[in-house]
Amino acid sequence: MGITWKNLLTLILSVAATVMVINNAPADDEAIFPMPAGKTYVEECGSCHTAYAPGLLPARSWRRMMGELDNHFGEDASLSEPQQLEILKALETLAADGNQANMRMRRIHGAIPAGTAPQRISETGYFKFMHDEVRPSIWKRKKIGTLANCIACHTRANEGRYGEREVRIPQ
Amino acid sequence: MKIRLLALLLCANSAHADTPQQILDGLVAQAGPASVTRGEKLFRGKFSGGKTADSCTACHTENAKLPGQHARTHKAIDPIAPVAQKDRFTDAAKVEKWFKRNCQEVLGRVCSAQEKADFTAYMISVK
């Protein structure tokens, strides 16, 4: 095949397209979950623990949780009504089964049995699958302590970032 | 003129951001004079009747200038003394909210205005 301008153009275009795909790949792949805009969510739901990304549970789980905040795993996590409504709306919009859910979030949702509204992310199938290589003794380290202490290892969890490169397991 | 405008802007900005002393003054106005010694006793005391934690230090650690760790979730907590963490005791609504939660947690009841004033006075006194 001789080099013609047309061939060359096709080649350049396909190389350019490949580069674009490669450039895009990490972003798609990188376990980034959308987070509610503004500071309310991290301030109110990130004070006692990680501000969990809404995309880790389906909307029905969040709805149930937000209706029982005065007895939240035995704690009083109640909010003023405007804040409660603001947070619930953001959680529903960005939930694992929300309209804008990405592939990863849909997989999370797919692994949750219909008709159940799990309250613990750390008990979902996806969480267990992703962490089956973390040895039990690691979870017991003082700075980690529980499976749900995401931010102990995922340093940017409060920004919804769970990518491999941002994992630091404390000693 | 310019300076007045600036001053006005600064005032508007700090409308809800108090100093720890202003928060203490507000509590003292309800309770009467505060005692640093009683505040430290509340901070270090062991209590029954609460929930998971039996003391403030269970989460805020014995040294108020050091980061604490939540007794149940193990999340790191910024130091509670304003000398070590400058946004502590600068937002009256936040202070009120956490007294309500944490007194229930440790004492199984709300704290009185006196206890809040004492605790705040102790935290301000930590240097």
Image (cartoon, coloured by chain):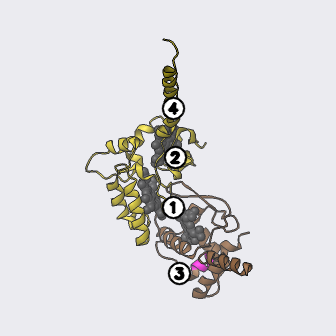
Chain colours: A yellow, B brown
- The image's mark for residue B23 is none
Q: Are marks 4 and 3 on the same chain?
A: no
Tell me, yes or no, whether the highlighted magenta stretch contains residue B118. Answer: yes
Taking B44 as reference, is A113 left or right? left
- Residue plotted at (74% across, 79% down): B3
Specify the amino acid type for callout 1.
Answer: Gly
By secondary structure, the bulk of the magenta-drawn segment is best described as: helix
- Label 2 vs label 4: CA separation? 20 Å
Closer mark to the observer between disc 3 and disc 1: 1
Label 3 sits on a secondary structure element that is loop
- Label 4 vs label 1: CA separation? 31 Å
Label 2 sits on a secondary structure element that is loop
Closer mark to the observer between disc 2 and disc 4: 4
- Label 3 vs label 1: CA separation? 34 Å
| Mark 4 / mark 1, whichever is N-terminal | 4
- Label 4 vs label 3: CA separation? 61 Å
Q: Which residue is mark 4?
A: A22
- The image's mark for residue A38 is 1
| Residues under numbered marks 2 and 1 in contact, where contact means CB atoms less than 8 Å apart | no
Q: Chain of mark 4?
A: A
